[in-house]
Amino acid sequence: KNEVEQSPQNLTAQEGEFITINCSYSVGISALHWLQQHPGGGIVSLFMLSSGKKKHGRLIATINIQEKHSSLHITASHPRDSAVYICAVRGPGNQFYFGTGTSLTVIP
Amino acid sequence: NAGVTQTPKFQVLKTGQSMTLQCAQDMNHEYMSWYRQDPGMGLRLIHYSVGAGITDQGEVPNGYNVSRSTTEDFPLRLLSAAPSQTSVYFCASSYGGERPFFGQGTRLTVV
């Protein structure tokens, strides 16, 4: 069973396009995280959300606690945004549950 | 402030060999954890620790051992490597429920 489901699994976009990645979860959570993993493997945290919406540059993350759903949006996408984006939730006992990731490729 | 330092970056082992993956953080985080990442699967929790002297098993603990003698260090030991342990391993740390910080990862191949 997957506590965290992401869609799409793979996404190819033209530079400048608006991108949305979705995340649904089935466990009660204290927070939801969006992570970015670049080729070469390092993982960095982009956002931590417990309600509402957060914005950082061209990235926007939203969460709907009632619907157990979050979205990550990238406006004016750029080739340097190419990476794997991972949704993670912090559930009972402070344990993390991870989605399988969305592989994004932005073509110039 | 180096964050989370994980070594080595790459390792090849023969079946049956043992090794230790090192993880150290300098942020005074009480929560540390080890994950493995396999193609088509999300990060899976191997072991975790909520403080020095306290460790617990995650989703896939078999074949791995951990200890937490200090707040800073959380090594992962492979007792007798098997090909099924070929994976990319990540160490992570966090303070309470705050954002996690990840090491750079270790790509392990067991032949």
Image (cartoon, coloured by chain):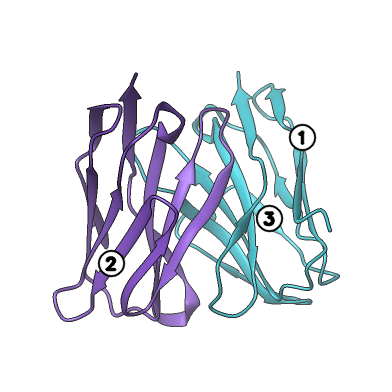
State left or right for residue B27 relative to residue B105.
right
B96 is higher (above) or lower (below) than B92 = below
Callout 1: helix, strand or loop? loop
Q: CA distance from mark 2 to mark 1?
A: 36 Å
Q: Closest to the observer: B101 or B107?
A: B101
Q: Is residue B59 above or below residue A102?
A: below
Indicate the quadrant where residue B31 lies.
bottom right
Label 3's element? strand
Residue B45 placed where, x, y %?
Answer: 50, 57
| Camera-nearest label, 1 or 3 | 1
Q: Chain of mark 1?
A: B
Residue A62's disc number? 2
Quickly name the residue at label 3: B65
- Near mark 2 (Cα within 10 A), the count class, few <14, some 14-19 or many ≥20, is many
- What amino acid type is highlighted by mark number 2? Thr
Tell which tag, 3 or 2, sits nearer the viewer: 2
Specify the chain shown as cyan. B
Q: What amino acid is labelled 1 in the image?
A: Pro
A17 left or right of B106 in image: left
User: Mark 3: few, some, or many residues within 10 Å (few <14, many ≥20)?
Assistant: some
- Screen quadrant of the N terminus of chain A: bottom left
Callout 3–callout 2 Cβ contact below 8 Å: no
* Labels 3 and 2 share a subunit: no
Closer to the chain start, of discs 1 and 3, is 1
Near mark 1 (Cα within 10 A), the count class, few <14, some 14-19 or many ≥20, is some
Instruction: Report whether mark 1 lies on the same chain as mark 3.
Output: yes
**Label 1, on which residue?**
B8
